[in-house]
Amino acid sequence: MASFSGFEKIVRRSEPLAMHTWFQLGGPAEYFAEPETVEELTALVRRCHEEGVPTRLLGQGSNILVRDEGVPGMVIRLSAPAFCGIRVEGRSLVAAGGALLGRAVTTAVHRGLAGLETLIGIPGTVGGALHGNAGAHGESIGQWTLQATVVTTSGEICRRGSEELLFGYRQSNLDDLVILETRCELQEDDPRELAQRMQKYWIVRKASQPLGHQCAGCAFKNPRGMSAGEIIDDAGLKGTRIGGAAVSDRHANFIVAEPECSSQDVLRLIELIRGQIHDRMGIELELELEIW
């Protein structure tokens, strides 16, 4: 058993992870920690590295499905104020990795900085958005990113400049354990016009996604030049269900978890959808959801 002597204040055992994810499914983390400072975070990561404890970072849990049996090792969540700050420096928006993406977007808009407004309504943290290069309407966070400060799996703090960063569709080469902070270089624009554009994007996104009270997640990446939701809808799979998991009636690329649902139900439904789409259309759907 790993020793976390000295970290008793922040480390908990057998923490239920369902309460920390949008699906609200899955088993516990073997170890769970919410450090208060960067120093506490790096010291904990170093201890995990020394003890050989596998370590994961959890943001808002909007794109995570935790298996019913839970997660071995350490799960770290950056919920403390030290990891959630946002500031504006000229045309740059500097956001901590634990900050909510929506708050970063609205901060930029209110300060007359354009570029991120298309991301409004995308759930999660800035760090998670950067890791997966979140985007919408042909724009993505990666195209505005100048640099990122990260923590490696050995607990070292490093700065990645733009020359080191690579972004693709829903992916980046930022595979370090923690994204501490990112700097986005944006364009000056009229705050009122930006706010109007942002509101339009918000309305479109909310009208097409599952209701806010539902436990749900987006399952698949869009194949090149195509919409995964439209593909699934065209295959007649909207409303398909296995156990307590169902394909959303509002958007076919979302899976909704009803009260009796298990993670295994969601996994079985994912495989059914992938199999049907492959057999009928010859298309291999790639998961956007991370399975823990």
Image (cartoon, helix red, strand yellow):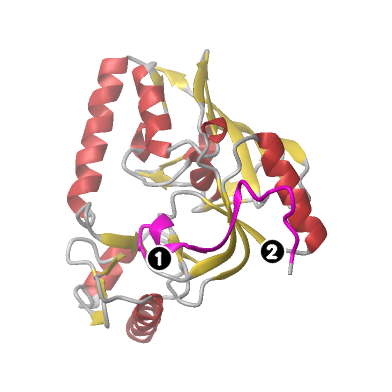
Please give left or right for residue 194 compared with residue 100 in the image: left
How many residues crowd around disc 2 within 10 Å: few (fewer than 14), some, or many (20 or more)?
some
Q: Is residue 128 above or below residue 66?
A: above
Q: Which residue is mark 1?
A: 220
Check disc 2 and report the residue beneath it: 54
Q: Magenta residues?
A: 2-24
Which residue is at a point 56% across and 46% down the rendered structure image?
Answer: 34
User: In the image, what residue type sits under mark 2?
Assistant: Pro
- Residue 38 location, quadrant: top right
Q: Position of residue 259 (x, y in %)?
A: 24, 71
- Judge by depth and name the residue closer to the eye, 277 or 220: 220
Q: Is 284 inside the magenta-drawn segment?
A: no
Mark number for residue 45? none
The answer to if 18 sits in the magenta stretch is yes
Residue 85: image location, x then y, percent = 51, 28
Which secondary structure class fits the magenta region best?
loop
Q: Which residue sits at x=65%, y=52%?
A: 175
Gap in Å between the C-alphas at discs 1 and 2?
26 Å
> Looking at the image, is mark 1 or mark 2 earlier in the sequence?
2
